[in-house]
Structures are given as C-alpha cells and as structure tokens.
Amino acid sequence: MKRILYITTLIIFVGQVSAQTYRAYGKVLTTTGDPIENATVFVEELNVKSNTNGKGYFQLELPEGLHILEVFSMGSNAGAQQLDLRSDTEIQFVLSEFSEDLEEVEIVSQRQKTNGISRLRAVDGFGIYEAKKNELIVMDDFAANKVSNNARQVFAKVPGLNIWESDFAGLQLDIAARGLGPSRTANFNTRQNGYDMSADALGYPESYYMPAMQAVDRIEIVRGAASLQYGTQFGGMLNFRLKQAPDVPIQLNVEQAAGSFGLYNSFISAGGTVGKADYYSYYQYRTGDGWRENSGFDSHLAFSRIGLQATDKLKLGFEYSFLDYKAQQPGGLTDDDFTSGDLSKSRRNRNWFQVTWNLFANTIDYRFSDRTKLNIRTFGLFSGRDALGNLEQIDRIDDPNSNRTLISDTFKNFGSEARLLHYYDVLGKRSALLFGARFYNGMTDRMQGNASNASDADFTFLNPEDLEDFDYQFPSTNYSFFMENVFNVTDRFSITPGIRVEHIQTDAKGTWKQTVKNFSGEVITENTFSDDKSVVRSRALFGLGLSYYLTNDLNMYANYSDNFRSVTFSDLRLNNPNFLLDSLISDESGFNIDLGIRGQLISWLNVDLSIFYLKYNDRIGVVLPSGSTLLFRTNVGDSRHFGIETFAELDILKMVGKEREKTALSIFSNLSLINAEYTASEDASIRGRKVEYVPEMMLRLGLNYSWRDLKATYQFSYLSDQYSDATNSTFNPNALTGLIPDYHVMDISVEYAPDPYKVTFGVNNLTNQKYFTRRAESYPGPGIIPATIRSYYVSLGIKI
C-alpha cells in the first residue's frame, strides 16, 4: 500500500508542474488571399489541433519551445512551418491548389511507407504506448483475403502469433501470443473502436464477434505491458478500428465476392459528413457450403455509427454492432481419419452453433484545452450463443435416436471507461499523464440440458423448467483505476511508470445434476446440487518502461509489467462428458518483460527485434491423468516463456538504388523462437514439460509488390510441431490430446483498384497442404479440426 501511495502521489505531483504556454495564431489563405474554412492546423507530436473559422483564423495554445506546425485542407496542398515559440506569435499559411498528379504521388508514398505494418505513436489517441511492444496493421495498404477474414494473412507481419484455423469462412478469430491459448482470442483484451466486444471481459473473455475486415481501417496490437491500461490479460490488447466517415455528403462502397465451396460475400457501406454530423454504416452477408460435409453457414453482420461535433470542444458518438450467424459443425476427426487423407468427412451431422450479438456504445470526447482532453466510452452487450449436438468423444458413433445436448449462454454486460490525457512540461521537456477509471458489470446465464434427437437446428430445451445438466448465473463486477506517465528526461530518453488497481468479484449461483449410468445407458442414480460461490479480490499491478531513440527513426525500448487473470465461469462450473473440474481452481498471476529495438535500421531496412520473458503462475490448463480418458481442468502449474520475436522488411528497389515513385517491391520475414515449459507443478509428470499450444518456431515470409493501383502479396507460413496438453501426450484414441505436427502453407493475394473500381483475387493454401492447428476438447469437435484445403476467391467492387 505504501508503494501505491508513493507512486500515485509522485505522478499527480509531477503532473501539476507546468511550464509557460503561449498562443500560436493566424490565418490560412489561398494563393489569391481568400480565407480557407475548416482547414486543420496541428502539432502532431502533441496531438494538438485547431480548425479554421469562416475567416480562416486559427489559434493553438502550445508550450514554450520548438514546434512544427502543419496544415491540411481538402483540395489544397499541405503545408508546414517550424516555430520557435517564446511569446504569443502570429503565423500565416498560404496553400496552393491540390493537383491530381500530386495527390496520386502522395497516396503512393504513404503506401510504400507502411506496407501494411506500422507502430503506434508514443501517445496515440487516448493511449500511451511509449516503450511498449506494439504493432499497427493498416488494412488498405496490402493485399489479403479480407473476404473470409483470413487471419493467417491479415496478421502475417505480427511476430509470435499462433493462429487456430477452425473454420473456412473466418466466422471467429482464434489467435494468441507467446504461448497462450488461441481459443476465441480469450487471452487478449479484445476491443472495437476502444471498447470491449468479448462475451464477458471477466467471466468469459471469449470473442464470438469479429467485425468485417472489409470495414476495418487498422488493427492495434499491444503486448503484455497493455495490462496497465486495458486490464488483466497476459496476451495484451487487440483493438479493431473501423473506417471513419469520408469528408463528403455521401459515399457508397459495394463489393460482391464469390469463392470455393459455395462462398458468397455481399458487402455494402455508406458514409459521409454533413455539417457537424458524420456517419458510417455497413452490412455484410456471407453464406457457404463449407469444404467438409455438414459445414454450411449463413452470417449477417452490420454496424452503424453517428458522430456529432456538438461544440468546438465536445464531440459525441453513438455506435451499434449486430451479428447473427448459424453454422453446422461437422465435428472433429480421429488421428486415423486424418492420416487416411479424407479430411472432408464428417462424424457428426446433428451439431449446430448460432450466435446473436448486439453491441452498443456511446463515446464522449471533450477538449478542455490544447493540453487536456477527456474521453468517456460507455458500452453495453446483449447477446447470446447456443451450441447444439453430441458432445461425446469423436471415436464414438452418434446414435441418431439419442437426445442432443444444448448449451445456451446469454450475456448482459455494461461498462464505462473514462480517460483523461494531460500534457505538461517538466524542466523544459514535454510529458504526458494518462489517468483512467473503469466500471464493469457482467451477467452471464448458462443453461445446459437435453434437446431433440432431430438433425435440424432446433435450439430449444426439451425440459426448460427442469434441465438435465445445469442452470447457472455468473455475475461479475469490476472497478479499476490506472495511471501512466511519459517523462521525457531528454530529447531522446523517456521513462514511463504506471500503476493499475483492480477490484474484482466473480460469482457462481445455480444448480447442477450428477447422473450415473450403467454400461447399458440406464440411469442408476441422479442427484441435484446447488452452488453459491463468490470470489472477491483486489490487486495492484505495477509497470515501468524505458525508451531511447538512437536516431529519429530507430528506437530501443524495455518494459516490465505485472499481470493477473481471474478464474472464468468455465473454471467455476463445467459439465462436459470429456472433462473433470478441479473444485479448488484459483486465479493466475505473473509478469511480462520486453526488450527490443525497432524502426529504420537502414533507409531500406525496417526492423522490430525483441526478446521477451513471460512468467505465468498457477496456469489453468488440462491434463490427461494416467489411465484415464477424461481430461482434468486445474491449475496445472507455473510456467515460464522465453522467446525472440523478429520482424524485418527490406525495400528491394531502394536497396539496389532503383526506387520509383509509383512502384514498390519488398520482402518481409517474421520469425519467432519460443521456449515455454512448466517450472513447477504438484504433478511430477508435468514439471519440465512443454507448455501446450506453443510451436517453438513460427516463420512467415512474404513478398509485397505494388505498381500504381495494383497490389500483390505472396506469403509462406511454417509452424513447428506443438503439444495440445500439459502432459505432452503424443496420441490418444479419442483425439482430444496428442501431437499437432509441423506444417507449412502458402497464399497469394492480388488487388487492383483503379478509382472507383476494385478487383481482388486470391488462392489460399496454394499447394493444397493437409494439416491441422488444433484438437478441440468440445465444440466444434471434439477431436482434430482440419484446416481448409486449397480454395479460391474473387471480388468485384465499386465506390460511388
């Protein structure tokens, strides 16, 4: 507690130290002397801006010192002036008309600069990212299969990601970093436009919803040190930023796509700006037969946002996201099925899955001054998911006359997060203080019981008033407060301390039944039990980051961050014929350490090289006890994860001295080497074992080419073998556990977009490799889930 009070007092005290500020004011004019209205004058490094009024007048409040003022106005060339501010100073910008040729050069230059991957600024929006391992994926700057949300291609330049390929259409996202479980991206704090989008951030942090990649502008990824600002997930934070409203009254974008196995994708978006209001909406419909038997699907996805610049200082936003999809699930395969080569076969024809998602959000942005601004995000989730079918081990024949099992979840969550960002000066150096608070209340209702023995998608219980398995409520409450501060000690060196205080309560209330049957399937005994559990805890997390700029474009960084992960409701109560649950299961804790160098090593070589150390105590996982066919879910033990994550992109034309304005050719390499093992466990057979779902080597190589409106990407991916449980079993007849062999796969994507048209084409799994990335313990298995064989897609679009 003394440490909390000391750091809090220090940050608040330093935040009050403020140097002298002055006004930079003036006009933005055309070459004929006419004023330019709604031009934006800004200082990028301070995130300070001002829009000109009807007379072209602007005014900025800036700290004393050297600044670069930039100005942008639609239809005019951008401008910039350096200003050494020592008193109130008048400045004037004169902008010439923006020619069509110059606009094209500017766009090409920007694309060459990012090639689809970049990094967040030290202070970006309402977040502090100085000294943190992070990536920024710029979606429009590279060619990839966005029609079916192919994560392998979208995240190709992000090192250290293990990706499960569970469905051919990309209905769900399953990724993880640094040896954590990829299932529904549960080890990332997943967000859309800065607010939560997962099922239940505390009790069930799995993501059934993912926005359409055709509507995503950029994807922000912050690794373990994100725990201080975004909450307790060891993997970090993953945020999907959707496209903004264009600066025209209305703009329509229509894309129609078709592909292998009956895939059809229809996407339409509309956006614009009218006066002080702006809007952006999209709708996507996808359907397909799937490449395996019994794997058809239908998906409806929609989003709408309205923004209002109520005053010069206040902006309001309202957002709504909707998802509804239904998919038949063919079940898993046994090892014999997989080695036989017939991967399209299905052992289940009565399994179904459906999701209905309603996500609401309200955002408030208020600028007190050019130095201080406030953001409040309030969000609500009213959603559900239903899993229907036979949960028995996949090597057992599905009796068509037996009742199916239905698991029905309803999520009702509410949360609000406020962030105050303040710039100030200490000893003549600019610093930034971020203070935030969060409230979150989650409620998940889970019911499990018998459903009909039919083969259709009938998501109703046979006995809703007296369920055969369980009926539970899982309420959760969270209060948290956090602070981070960037102290710029010199022009090149900064220190970023931070603290987060969490108060979490997770409950489990309900009834469950235990049924014992004989070998003939007849019920011998049946008992009903009730639970009323409550776990309350408060935790303080600390972190420290160091950053040093060797040059303006090359940065060294290091950080340490505490972390913590509470038990989920699946850890508190589970009824699955393939599982046993440890009643004494407890929270997980640990820390992350990063050390790296990133930026332009040479003018033609962009790098991000880092090493990390992740300590994970009381890790929850599954083991296969000796002599048992049932998995046991428990605190398996303590693990440590050490690794090297490298990314390098080489500009070939620049390297050989043949750089061209409208042509780019680059090659990239993404290599991760990870060693993760259990260092402590009560089970001697686990100590020293490899952590499950951790390929020791992940290599992704690619070639990017662009010429005018044409972009093309070739990608190669290789992952070494990995285990699927903590005991490192290599084979199990029911296929729940066992080795996942190494594999490699290649993809090609091409995009041609002469304004206003766009044509895309791609081949996934070019060499038709037979491989799998996961062994499912339950849905959509159980058993081996094979990855998609070779497939094609083509898309036609027009922007009006």
Image (spheres, rainbow, N blue to C red):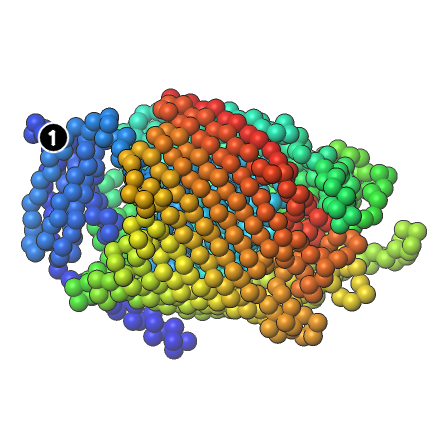
Judging depth in this view, the residue of 26 and 795 nearest the camera is 795
Can you see residue 32? Answer: yes
Q: Is residue 66 above or below residue 197?
A: below
Could you tell me which residue is drawn at 48 percent across and 67 percent down? 613
- Rendering coords of residue 349 (x, y %): 77, 37
In the foreground, 529 or 679: 679
Q: Return the residue at label 1.
A: 30
Q: Tell me the residue at 72%/37% (across/down).
A: 344
Locate the N terminus and report the quarter of the image it occupies: bottom left
Inspect the image, locate mark 1, and give the three-letter code of the amino acid beneath it: Thr
Q: For this view, does 266 lie left or right of residue 549?
A: right
Taking the view exactly as shown, the residue that stands out farthest to the bottom is 2
**Residue depicted at 32% across the width and 55% down the height:** 601
Q: Quick one: label 1, few (<14), some, or many (20+) residues within 10 Å?
A: some
| Mark 1, secondary structure of its residue | strand
Looking at the picture, how far across and down is residue 329, in whole percent? Answer: 70, 39
Tell me where residue 129 appears, x and y as whole percent.
Answer: 35, 57
